[in-house]
Amino acid sequence: PILTEKSFSNMAGMKSVILALALLAGVDAKVYFKEQFNDEKWESRWVASTFPGKSASDMGAFEWTAGEWYGDENDKGIKTSQDAKHYGLSAMMDKSFTQKKDLVIQYTVKHEQKLDCGGAYIKIASKADQKSFSGDTPYQIMFGPDMCGSTKRTHVIFNYPAKDENLEAKSEIKCETDQKSHLYTLHIKADASYEVFIDEESKQTGKLEEGWDFLLPKEIKDPKESKPEDWVDAKKIADPEEAKPEGYDDIPAQIEDPEAEMPDDWDEEDDGEWEPPMISNPDYKGEWKPTMIDNPDYKGPWEHPLIANPDFKDDKNLFQRCKDCAMIGFELWQVKSGTMFDDIIVTDSLDEAKAFAKETFFAKKDAESEMFDNVEEERKAAEKAEREAAKAAKDAEEEDEEEEREMLAAIAHAGDQRRHLAQVAAAEARAAEESARAERERDRARRRRMEQLETRLRGENLTNEERKSLNELRLDPNFTEFLRLARLVAGSHHAIAYTGAGVSTGPGALLPTVRGVYGVSNSQLDTDDFSPESLQSLRPTRTHMGLVALYQAGYLKFLCTQNIENLHRLSG
């Protein structure tokens, strides 16, 4: 019907028409699932699961509660209640459905524990075994916040049967990280667009085709085309008229300190020939590099011509992200428990979801926020009082100790202060002499080590095998660095080694690297063959054994490591 201006001749008529249209829209809306957790029978509608390969003790339980702060103490939700546990919980919808138009998934999340690492997302799936519902259970939509360390995102993941893959959104959506309730809404529209809201504020919107890698690219680089051999894409070139100054490479990076003087107590017989310390050469300017100028032959970056992708297939039903959906559930891991879930709705109408949010989330929001602020104020006041009490107790203890020290000092003074001072002076003199003797012994040991090193570098007192290794080492391009490091270690009073992952994952190691694209923690790799038990088969590398040799020779005093594979102990 066509509504003309005459149809709205008075405001009462206009309001009636608008109300009627709104009521018709409400009648047309379909609600596939709704849960408020406000009755004790909620557990009869939900089924807890045990993940395959896990025992019941690995699984955490949900607590039915209004939480530590709330807008209505009678309005309850469910909360994770045990730290470092997996959580599995699912419910069946009244009947399965296949998306024909819009789809809206909405629920509230509250991290009372100030979550640092754990998930709080929800999944929509086809009918499956609820008792074993887990991360291995196929799903069609995964939506909601997930945090661990610096990663704090709102997942929107769709399963795409054409690729048999779960596709994560290409653009990250941040999630809320405070301790108050927040409303998460995912709106998938029939025109193949989407929008994500948090507390009804739009966080991201766009086309499904552009936000996820559902389809192959419409265009590809023409395989018959390639960059011409004479194409010049170097924007800058070295100035051909500029030459390296004569003698530039003869300037050393370091020179002897001209202001250094040999110590008065230096004994060349005991200490050897004195050498002044080295300092940075102010005339050294680093490796010579010619001035770069604009390349007169520069043509700009070559652009590969594009052609239509012959493998591209459009998907007219891309919006249909739910087919035979029948189940909703949580499949989570949380290091620290305390996350609450409430007011879940799955519908084909954003207006229906907003009306539900108005009745639930927004009706409680302000009162909950006020109660949280009061709880935080009380917590901070209690912590402040505790700190002040502890400080007062410490001050009182220190005051008692000070009085005791003063009393003992008075007794000592009354007894024989002169004798006491003489004893102290004698003890200090002995300590100074002992320290000087130890310092001389350390210097002699350092000189012996330096002499031994220089002797071996000259090829003296070496076995044939050692002489062969030394000659091979001299050919190494890094020999100067090896020599500098050897002299630093030999000339030090104390040498300390600090090691990390590289000492165990370098050349010749059996331990695979854990991090990075090719690490065993990467989800693309199969980790079944790697487990803590496999560490028992590892053996020390040459680096481990080299550190042992330094320790046994007396050069290495301490070794600090952040590794846990026990290879330093196995090496001796």
Image: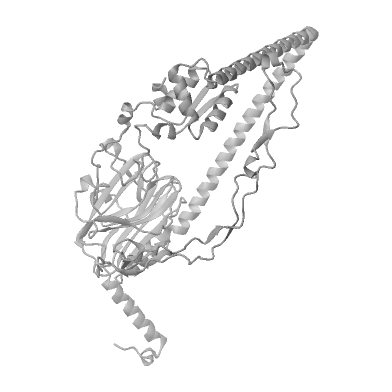
Tell me residue 10's x, y (percent).
40, 89
Residue 74 in view of the camera: no
Which image quadrant for residue 84? Answer: top left
Residue closer to the observer: 415 or 570: 570
Residue at point 38% right, 82% down? Answer: 15
Q: Quick one: 452 or 116, which is closer to the camera? A: 452
Q: Tell which of 361 and 309 is nearer to you.
A: 309
Q: Is residue 400 above or below residue 10?
A: above
Q: Is residue 166 left or right of residue 73?
A: left
Question: Can you name the residue that lies furthest to the bottom here?
Answer: 6
Residue 532: quarter of image = top left
On-image quarter of the C terminus: top left
Q: Report the side of 133 relative to 378 (left or right).
A: left
Relative horizontal placement of residue 248, taking residue 508 as reference (left or right): right
The image shows residue 66 at horizontal and vertical percentages of: 39, 50
Q: In the picture shown, does residue 481 fall above or below 333?
A: above
Say which residue appears at 67% left-offset and 25% top-offset.
398
Q: Is residue 460 visible?
A: yes
Residue 162 in picture, x, y percent from top left: 23, 60
* The N terminus lies in quadrant: bottom left
Q: Quadrant of residue 505?
A: top left
